[in-house]
Image (cartoon, helix red, strand yellow):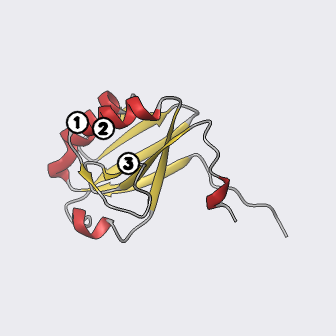
Amino acid sequence: MPSTAIGNHAKISARTIDRERIRKFYHEVLGCEITKRSNEIDFFRFDGEFFVAVIYDDTALPDDEHTRATWLELKSDDPIALTKRIRDFGVRELETWERDRLYFQAPGGQVFRVAGSREDLSRFES
């Protein structure tokens, strides 16, 4: 059987009305570099060479429907500071079974959780 891994490129769709707030969140709050910017698509580079393309499409899912889609994890060497920056920016926080961790909807509706980059997350792996 060939081996498989998740690649370092992802695409999300978001409504054009959220474009400026998305740019501000990914660049100013998360510290991503904007490697391409246009009215139709933005590319953001995370630390570690992970890229997210945001395609602006007015037929994208509304925010409330994103909670049923894929949830992603943001790792940080200072998850407490990142959590504060995200909360200060103003996001919709989600209640989950994990009360001590921030789960939230980013501008555009995508759901993330914050974790420490050196945190032992093995309990989620078996």
Q: Residue at x 49, y 50 (%)?
A: 73
Element assignment for label 2: helix
Which residue is denoted by mark 2 in the rendering? Answer: 86
- Give me the disc on residue 73: none
- Kindly check if marks 2 and 3 are in contact, taking CB atoms under 8 A apart as contact: yes
The answer to which image quadrant residue 67 occupies is bottom left
The answer to whether the residue labelled 1 contacts the one labelled 3, judged by CB atoms less than 8 Å apart, is: no
Quadrant position of the N terminus in the picture: bottom right
Name the foreground residue: 53 vs 46: 46
Write down the residue under mark 1. Answer: 89
Residue at image mark 3: 102
Give the amino acid type for the residue marked by disc 2 in the picture: Ile
Residue type, numbered disc 1: Phe
The amino acid type of the residue labelled 3 equals Leu
Spatial separation of the CA atoms under disc 1 and disc 3 = 14 Å
Q: Real-space Cα distance between discs 2 and 1? A: 5 Å
| Location of residue 114 in the rendering, given as x and y in whole percent from the top left corner | 44, 45
Measured in 3D between alpha carbons, the distance from the residue under mark 2 to the one under mark 3, in whole angstroms, is 9 Å
